[in-house]
Image: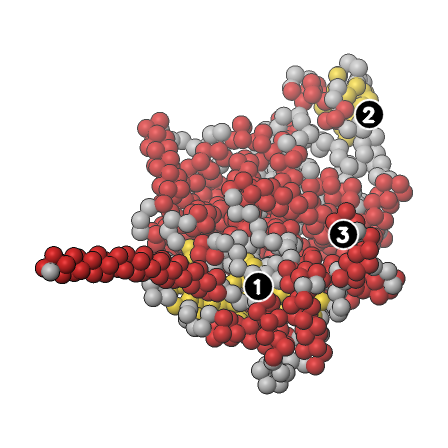
Amino acid sequence: MFKKVCFILLFLIILAECTRFPSRRNSKKESRAKTDKNVRARGDVFENMFSLYDPTFLSTVWPKIRNGVHLTLSNDCFNDSAVFYEDFARGHLWAYMVADSSGRYEPGVFAGQGLWLGDKRQCFDLDRNLEEASKTKELPELDWTAVGSNENRAHHLEDTRSKFPLAYSVAKIYMTVINANFVQNFDLTLGLCLPRSCDRDDITSILTFSIMLNDNLKSNRSHPRVIKMTSLREVTDHYNFHHDLPAMVLSAITLSLILISMVATITDIKIIRCKRTSRSISFDLQKYKNTDISNRFLDIKSNECIDSNRCGDVSFTNNFNNGNTNVVGVKNVNLNPAPPVTLDVVSTERVTGSCDRCGKYRRQCKSPKEAVNLPPCPRVKYSSVASLTTQEIRSSLTKRLFLCFSLKYCLMRIFNTNMANKDMSMMHLVKIVATLWVIFVHVAVIVSYSTVNTSSIHHHDDMYYILATGTLAFDTLFFVSGLFSAHHYFYLRSHYTVEELVSFGGFFGQILQYICFITNRAVRLLPSYIYTIFLSGVLARMSLSTSPLTPPDGDHVNCDSYWWRNILYVTTLYPVGEECMQVSWYLSTESQLHVIGALLCALGTGRRGRVIASLLMTAMLATTAADVTGAYRDYVYSMPGVFSAYSTIINRPWARVVPYFTGVIAGWSLYKTDGVIKVSKMARSWLWLVTLTSLSLSLSLPWLQPRWAAAWLHLTWPAALMWPALLAGTRYKATTRRILNNSMTCALSRLTYSALLLHGPVARYLLLDTDTALCSQTLCIWSYFAGTTLLTLFGALLLSLFVEIPFCCILRRLSDCANK
């Protein structure tokens, strides 16, 4: 009996254990199911986290909503949207294509990729096909190989045509996601292809309704987020110039300039010929028989010109009876002396017997005593006052002003190798490099904004390196500007009297000289500047209307509203958000410093020189301290967005005081040395060591900590440029002068101003006229820079041909006539 009881108990225990095994397996299955469910839930949460406009979910709930109850739309917009979402739910191809044209979540959002643009071109093609079909009553052509059997062709064609007109819009959305582990902000750009009957308020309502459905129904508030739409604009396929009055006026001015230039060119080449003016110029040939000039110009025995390129059209006759040689048949010899204000050119034939110009001004080349009475080289001058009599001047002013627009004349001026200040040829080359550097910085800013437009600028970001070292390009331009300005002023002051420059002397003559010095530059630059201001405004409005990507500037409004600030060079006195043209701060700052620098140069002569020099050094140290203090305050936190970083790092007007006045000191030093510098070998070694150290430190400082120390670049970089500038203009001037013997180098130097004006509008037109985000790879940036530079230089050439050179010529001719 006992054995039976034990057996029964053992059996029951075994049976109980056997029944427990399936329950464990079931529990494991339930655990895995819960885990998979949680994983899927997390995946759904991540996908729904960035869901803004969801046509799939809208098509499901749309039949259940009522206009005016769940959302408020216009009747036409609601009816067209109902047709669209109903066909989308039924799987019609045209509805799929419309939904596919709108933007949605794309990978890389945590790295800042917030450009969800969709496909603007597909949306416009659908709308255009509907318009063409309504006109021709025919369906668009398709690839029949993808359609299937012949019986489905008619249905397929009908299914690929939209049932109402479409429009493409771009919404700027600022979203903050609040998670248990992080809080992240996102700046998103969303493209939407919706019925054209939906206006701005309707699109806002649809987008807000879609976000509300996603947060409350689809995701059941599983991911809290705050969404704010900051802007919404419709993008058109083509810009309508007929409603833009400044664009029409600018087009009329451009066509007028082209027409005048063409007529002036034809007149200059075909009809108007350079007049011959014969004058017998006698000089003692025996005196120069053994000089270099007799060998360069003519053979005394044969009386023939050896080098026609240097002599020009000159015929020589000998009169051996009296030992003199008469030079006759010279074209356009300067019979009348040039007016005082027209600082005419002197040739180096007084020095070397060559007809190559040595500078811009009459007294720039020192002539040896034995060559004082030599005749000038013959030149062809286009309607110059110097080649006309007083009666011709009064009767042909209109003709000479008209010929200023000749393309032949303008091209010769641009590619002419005779430039002023050839001893500073190296600085012309430095100016070209700095201009290309500025273009690269602005191209990199636009590319960064159009690819990773929401990331902050941190210390280790590539864009911070570009901006921090790119500020050296502007410092270089300020340094070169100060150098040229000071050297020009001191040269005029020392080689010309006040009466020669402004016709009368005394205290008021000095004041007038100062006024003329600062206004001459401003007026000379104005025509090209005014033209580019309105061109930038027109291109900005065109980009805003046709491009999904636009920079966060206000050129489309500011260039029409605040253009007068630009032409008065006072842009920096107003908020940055009201600037027209990204480079306007540079032009305004340079003009203001030009006024102050010229005043210091005027006051710094004589006994007051030491006092002015002390005040200048004090001001430079004070501005450096203020800039470093401001940089310490501005650079502590990460800067949101590349344009904000540009305004903080580069757009610092008063930080350019030190570079500009360092250039002024370099220009004064070049003038005082008078082409000769005497420095011992030990001193030269130390100067080169300090220069190379300063250059290396300036280039590497942005990579060091702390970041605000980069403000010292405005002091170290121009200081490093002083010694090479002095050395190139004195000890190595004979070598560096060869730089400007190349016509392409001279042309690039003359086109730098126009290139600075045009590169911003060109980059906007070339880079932002795309339907997708730009490539941010290094090779892509360099390719964008190359394309922008080539197009900018071509535009600068046209701007110089049609605007800058003609108006400079007109100002010169009017000045000549006023002082005749």
Amino acid on which the number 2 mark rests in the picture: Ser
| Residue tagged 2 | 315
Nearest to N terminus: mark 2 or mark 1:
1
Nearest to N terminus: mark 3 or mark 2:
3
Question: Which of the 4 image quadrants contains residue 11?
Answer: bottom left
| Residue tagged 3 | 147
Does residue 350 appear to the left or right of 50 in the view shown?
A: right
Where is 387 relative to 540, above or below?
A: above
Query: Distance of mark 2 from mark 1, alpha carbons?
Result: 77 Å
Counting from the top left corner in percent of width and height, residue 266 is at 86, 44
Query: Distance of mark 3 from mark 1, alpha carbons?
Result: 32 Å
Circle 1 Cα neighbour tier, 10 Å, few/some/many (<14 / 14–19 / ≥20):
many
Label 3: state its secondary structure. Answer: loop
The single residue placed furthest to the left in the displayed view is: 2
Amino acid on which the number 3 mark rests in the picture: Val
Residue nearer the viewer, 466 or 188: 188
Label 2: state its secondary structure. Answer: strand
Say which of marks 2 and 1 sits in front.
1
The single residue placed furthest to the bottom in the displayed view is: 69
The single residue placed furthest to the front in the displayed view is: 1
Q: Residue at x 70, y 81 (%)?
A: 75
Counting from the top left corner in percent of width and height, residue 159 is at 75, 62
Residue 44 shows in the view:
yes
| Residue tagged 1 | 190
The single residue placed furthest to the top in the displayed view is: 301
Count of number-bearing discs: 3
Question: Which of the 4 image quadrants contains residue 682?
Answer: top left
